[in-house]
Image (cartoon, grey):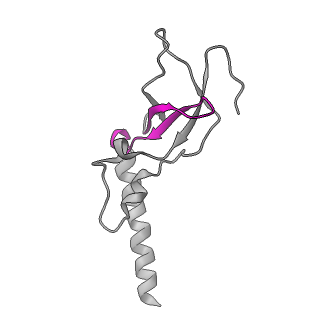
Amino acid sequence: MATLLRGEVPVILQPAGTAQYKGAYCPPGVPFAEVRRGPFDGKADIVVRPDADGELPRHATFGNGAVVYEYDGRDAKGRAVYRYAPRLSPSHQAVMDGVAEVYADNARKGEQR
């Protein structure tokens, strides 16, 4: 875990919940469960700093804003929980198209046996 400075709150990144993935892009042939998975899920060495009103940031972004996680409350350990937000992540469609290619390749390999 990262060393906390005064006022900082530890963060855990989690897969998308219903609120985050409802209506998100999912190409044909890809199980919708794949939409929930974010590239940084499980990462726990991140901290956020509350604003002047004491509120935590609504969103945490990574990769120059390509991946967005949305604040979803705190867990039992007091960490801020941020969930992957595919509808808000500019890179989501490209990632899902790549996942679709992998599923299609695996399906073709299965048919060749």
Give the tally of numbered discs. 0
* Image quadrant in which you'd find residue 4: top right
Give the residue at x 36% y 46%: 18
Query: In the image, 75: left or right of 89?
Result: right
Residue 7, above or below 108: above
Query: In the image, 42: left or right of 59?
Result: right
- Outermost residue toward the front in this view: 76
Residue 110 location in percent, x, y?
45, 84
Residue 67, above or below 3: below
* Image quadrant in which you'd find residue 105: bottom left
Quadrant in which the N terminus is drawn? top right
Give the residue at x 41% y 86%: 111
| Stretch of the chain drawn in magenta | 67-90
Residue 103, above or below 43: below
Residue 100 location in percent, x, y?
38, 64
Give the residue at x 42% y 58%: 34
Residue 79 location in percent, x, y?
59, 31
- Outermost residue toward the bottom in this view: 113
Residue 71, above or below 83: above
Q: Is residue 23 magenta?
A: no
Q: Is residue 71 magenta?
A: yes
- Outermost residue toward the top in this view: 52
Query: In the image, 42: left or right of 105?
Result: right
* Image quadrant in which you'd find residue 17: top left
Residue 65 location in percent, x, y?
43, 34
